[in-house]
Image (cartoon, coloured by chain):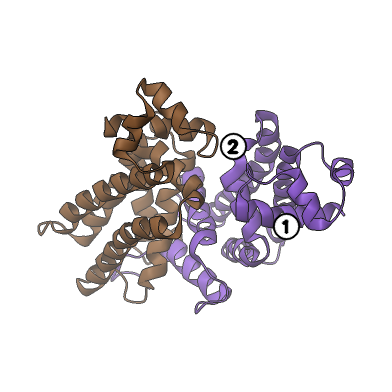
Chain colours: A brown, B purple
Amino acid sequence: MRGRIIKESIDLFDKKGFSKTSIQDIVDTIGVTKGTFYYYFKSKQELLRDIHLNYIKELLKEQEVILNDEYISCKEKLNRLIYLIIKNIKVHGKSARVFNREVRHLDQEQVKSVNVYRKEFRLNLQKLIVEGKEKGEFRENLKNDIVIFGILGMVNRSYNWYNPEGEVSEEELVNIYMDLILNGIKLDANRT
Amino acid sequence: MRGRIIKESIDLFDKKGFSKTSIQDIVDTIGVTKGTFYYYFKSKQELLRDIHLNYIKELLKEQEVILNDEYISCKEKLNRLIYLIIKNIKVHGKSARVFNREVRHLDQEQVKSVNVYRKEFRLNLQKLIVEGKEKGEFRENLKNDIVIFGILGMVNRSYNWYNPEGEVSEEELVNIYMDLILNGIKLDANRT
């Protein structure tokens, strides 16, 4: 039931917005009583927080598996991590959109509890840049934090424009991003 | 007065959200009557649309000046265009945030009227990539549209995390982005 409430409320928040969706709307859609809702969540705010906690914790688990793989290069890890985000558009696009738009309805403590995990995801990526420098895969003179903000901005922004059912497949999109991130756009006669 | 209404409403929408801000709130803050509001705007939605139209039209004008400069390279044009966006964070950050968050409150026609200009800005950037390829500044095998979505995602996302008053100056941030965009992160022994 908890999963069902989360799923239906993401749809409602996406369509009508968080403010205009009441707990009554949510329970009506599922056909249960408010009591059922309050059994699982203290408030609509807590539900919104949990929607994103679910999502980001799942991503972190998958990120960990990729980062701990000893048999692949840092470039390959970066590739797989970007693919992880892109393939999530299909599954979790709505949830991410809802969260980014409605985060202001959460109180400070709730935002903090989510941001702990978001920051962890970002810092793990930063560590990958450090590791890639040590292994001679990435250039030394990169500012780890800003490079990762840039890459995440580029990739996350796909949630707004990329249509996984369109002309460009998820794999192609990841390849294009990786080419851009690794090689840049400059034509350089000295480059292989 | 029109400018004053726009300015104060951006602040209110940013703080309280669009839904929870009434026209009464807006006119109370300025100390005028609702009649004054309706003299300039048909509705709160129209005000929201105009907030963004103002912003994007201003950007387009400045973009045009940069793109039409015959004395600078495509790389330099890209540099100046990114700087244009970054320096706008200080001035228009709130306005852009409000728009991105509240755009769903506009009706289709209103969204369309704004998106015409947003698309123009993006397509102008795409043309710059094409021009840069022709002039041998950028690599041939780039997908113009996705590269520009990527660059815009990266740069626009700075609105969410970048603090112009912090450690990294706007000029430094632009240089870091340009280095990333032009050269990528890969260490390449064959590169100059």
Which residue matches tag 1?
B68
Do circles 1 and 2 both sit on a common chain?
Answer: yes
Q: Position of residue B67 (x, y in %)?
A: 68, 57
Q: Is residue B90 left or right of residue A153?
A: right
Answer above or below: position of B100 versus A144: above
**Rendered view: A91 above or below B134:** above
Q: Residue at x 38, y 30 (%)?
A: A34
Q: Residue furthest top?
A: A31
Which of the 4 image quarters holds residue B80? bottom right
Dot 1 surroundings within 10 Å: few (below 14), some, or many (20 or more)? few
Query: What is the secondary structure assignment of the residue under circle 1?
Result: loop
On residue B104, the disc is: 2
Q: Is residue A151 visible?
A: no
Q: Position of residue A172 (x, y in %)?
A: 34, 40
Residue A61 visible here: yes
The quarter of the picture where residue A99 lies is: top left
- For the N terminus of chain A, the image quarter is top left
